[in-house]
Image: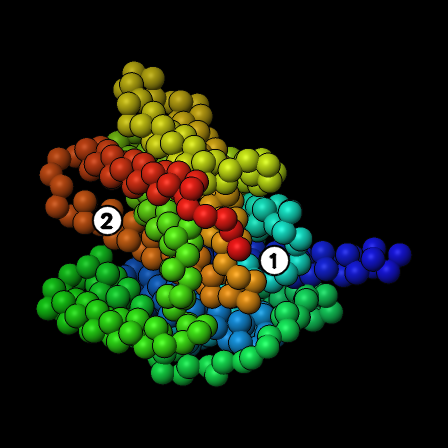
Amino acid sequence: MDKEKLSFRKYTGIVAILLVLVMTVLDVTVVNVALPVLADKFGISDSLTVWIVTIYQLLITMLILPLSSVGDLFSYRRTFLTGVVVFTIASALCAASQSFIMILVARAIQGIGAACVMSVNIALTRLIYPRNILGRGLALNGMVVASATAAGPTIAGALLSVASWHWLFLINVPFGIIAFFIGRKFLPHNPARSARERFDKISAVANAMMFGLLFLALGGYTGNRDEPRMLIMLTAAIIVGIYYVRRQRGHTAPMLPVDLFHIRIYTLSVITSVCSFIAQMLAMVSLPFILLNSYGFTSITTGLLMTPWPLATMIISPLAARFVERHNAGATAAAGMVVFAAGLLLLILMPDNSINEWSIVWRMTVCGIGYGLFQTPNNIVMVSSTPVSRTGGAGGMQSTARLVGQTLGATLVTIVFAIATGTTFARVHTCLWISIAFAISAGIFSISRHNSGKTA
């Protein structure tokens, strides 16, 4: 009976993690939909309004590795709960905002809270689930993220149709309170450490500067394209990055997990992840343009036609997790990338005389099935190939790989649209061919892990 109570306590803790994951993911998708409303409310241009989304993602990228280090050194549980409190309070501040500057500051604080949560959620999941069913826990996380991504636009539209924009943020408050009390009672503590490193504040500043300068430079290309300023920021990011990496080599548990890159299977997993997210974003950002401008679908129909992708990923992810409990995860992930690339190829080769909603839906579903087969097995390999004491750093690097891949993918779409000649149809097809190339690269890196050693 005591064992059953212990098991109940452990698995109840996952509810807090899933609740906050939903909140942090929804806060990107619902705000995207509400940007025109917020631009009108605060009397600002569309380009300025985008900063309400950008500042949130930028803070997460800058802080996720330093906060992963905090979790490794001190407490995953405390870092997570601090993030929940900060995120919940910031949500209330967003709803109370009376000016653009106020909501921008509140969104930055929200980003800090989200970074706390995202930096340790994988580490906590690894502590909650036994090794033999860890894949199911990671799949559940992935399924919840996919569900929130798919449902975000619908939830935002429903809320805005019956209430003011404030409720897009206020809805987080009750769920944040519930998640905090569940997490405080049921989340596990870190395993005991024989020695404790000191938190490296200089490395934390260097990390924030490196990623901040890099993504601001990339964001500049997608905006006013001030080349001199972009070049200065990129140069500064490279200089700070070189210093940062050199500094990490002297640490036994570095903030940027350079020590983990000595594990070949982990390194291949990170490269695989970056390539896969570049491929995903190239397709997901470019496809709405061809649906709207070339095929003539409405905005609502375009949103619905994009939905089968995350829905298929949501359904396939837990099945893939069970499959890799007995089969090779690297090979399964590689097969997923092949299916994903096949789905994109089917979209490219779709005959003009057979374009309708159904012909697009089933092809989008193929893409989602492929990504679902890839995502969870890849996460399992990446997390389980590292020592338990370094799970925070490994999980932080996983989130960083995702953010880097997504940003590079979106930037590549901008570059293709800027320099490619021809119609929107041709430009989107160029993006999809590049996406296929990255998907195949991800598959090659994934299958190469087959003989790269055992997981930790």
Q: Could you tell which of marks 1 and 2 lies nearer the N-terminus? A: 1
Q: What residue type is labelled 1?
A: Thr
The residue lying toward the viewer, choosing from 246 and 208, is 246
Q: What residue type is labelled 2?
A: Leu
Q: Which residue is drawn at 24% across and 61% down?
A: 218
Residue 199: x percent and y percent? 46, 81
Q: Which residue is drawn at 40% across and 76% down?
A: 251
Pointer 1 residue: 125
Pointer 2 residue: 412
Question: Any mark on residue 156, and which?
Answer: none
Q: Residue at x 68, y 67 (%)?
A: 188
Q: Is residue 376 left or right of residue 267?
A: right
Q: Is residue 418 left or right of residue 273?
A: left
Please tell me how crowded label 2 is: few (under 14), some (14-19), or many (20+) other residues with Cα within 10 Å: many
The residue lying toward the viewer, choosing from 421 and 131, is 131
Residue 278: x percent and y percent? 32, 47
